[in-house]
Image (tube, rainbow, N blue to C red):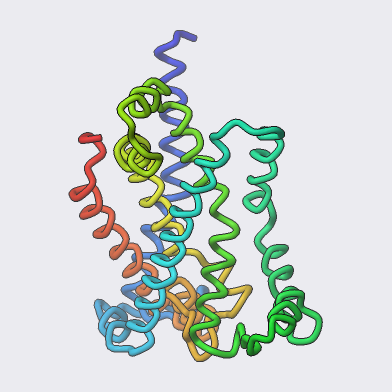
Amino acid sequence: MSSKATIYTFLVIGLLVTLVLIVAPVAYAISLSFYKLDSFVGEAKWAGLDNYIAIVQLPEFWCALWNGVVYSAGSIVLQVVLGIGFALILNETFPGRNFVRGLSILPYLLPTVVVILTFKWMVDGSIGILTKAIAAAGLPPVNWFESSGAAMTSVILVSVWMWTPFVTTCFLAALQTVPTSLYEAARVDGTTAVQRFFHITLPMLKPILTVVVLLRAIWMFNKFDVIWLLTRGGPVGSTEHLAILSYRHAFSLFDIGGGAALATISFAILSVAVFFYFRIFPLEDD
């Protein structure tokens, strides 16, 4: 088989896999949003835009949308700030650097359920290590899952702990491409470490920063497992975002069309956000 035939073969296979596993399910989910359906095996009745109209009129929808923005923004900011900081540290030369680099990726490799169960054990009201540490410091107890602010803080902190290693790895790889001659010339000019970071390091990290922020925004806005396993959207919907609201409508309230409409709206919001993101931060200018 010629090289050109091999390329076309893999291209066709890739397109077929994408069509079957991505395009077809998305098209099916969008089509469901135009029907009234109380189960996946029930009779579907054409509803047009009724599902969308009913969804946007729900106060829970706007609350879930706001929760998703808060959760995504808080997680992304902390992941990027900590990721850059850890990458700068791991880029320095020190004894055992390779071992520390390997150890730093560990949270990213752990299953989500293990991380959630460990965090719940740490904040347990009776035996939790964080609970005992807070009490030993003389601070008032924290009701991690009983107040809105503490619950949102919990899901953000767990997400940051799990995904910061991924961000760190991306920035660390980018730092390897920065020529050391730039830093040497800057030191000769008498610049400080802060000046070198803002005038050399940060501009050189801009391409990877643009991609990382976009990927993390998409993933965190749709992140389901962390919030579902930790709070199930509670208390009183304070951590419920569009992904959980869509799941609840489809599988708890048996409103398949409404759940599909919520998922479609979430997809549309992300598509518009990505479009404007690339208009503001075009990759070709980097």
In the image: residue 147, left or right of residue 215: right
- Pick the residue in front: 43 or 207: 207
Q: Residue at x 62, y 88 (%)?
A: 143
Q: Residue at x 52, y 75 (%)?
A: 153
- Pick the residue in front: 147 or 202: 202
Taking the view exactly as shown, the residue that stands out farthest to the right is: 127
**Where residue 258 appears, x then y in whole percent?**
39, 79
- 239 is higher (above) or lower (below) than 164: below
When asked about the image quadrant of residue 206, the answer is top left
When asked about the image quadrant of residue 272, the answer is bottom left
In the image: residue 97, left or right of residue 199: right
When asked about the image quadrant of residue 187, the answer is top left
- 250 is higher (above) or lower (below) than 75: below
**Where residue 6 appears, x then y in whole percent?**
46, 17
- Pick the residue in front: 123 or 229: 123
In the image: residue 107, left or right of residue 159: right
**Where residue 8 appears, x then y in whole percent?**
40, 21
Taking the view exactly as shown, the residue that stands out farthest to the top is: 2
**Where residue 230 appears, x then y in whole percent?**
62, 75
Taking the view exactly as shown, the residue that stands out farthest to the left is: 279
Q: Residue at x 44, y 54 (%)?
A: 81
Number of dots carrying numbers: 0
In the image: residue 28, left or right of residue 137: left
Q: Residue at x 65, y 61 (%)?
A: 112
- Pick the residue in front: 226 or 31: 226
Q: Dividing the image into 4 quarters, which one contains the C terminus?
A: top left
- 186 is higher (above) or lower (below) than 231: above
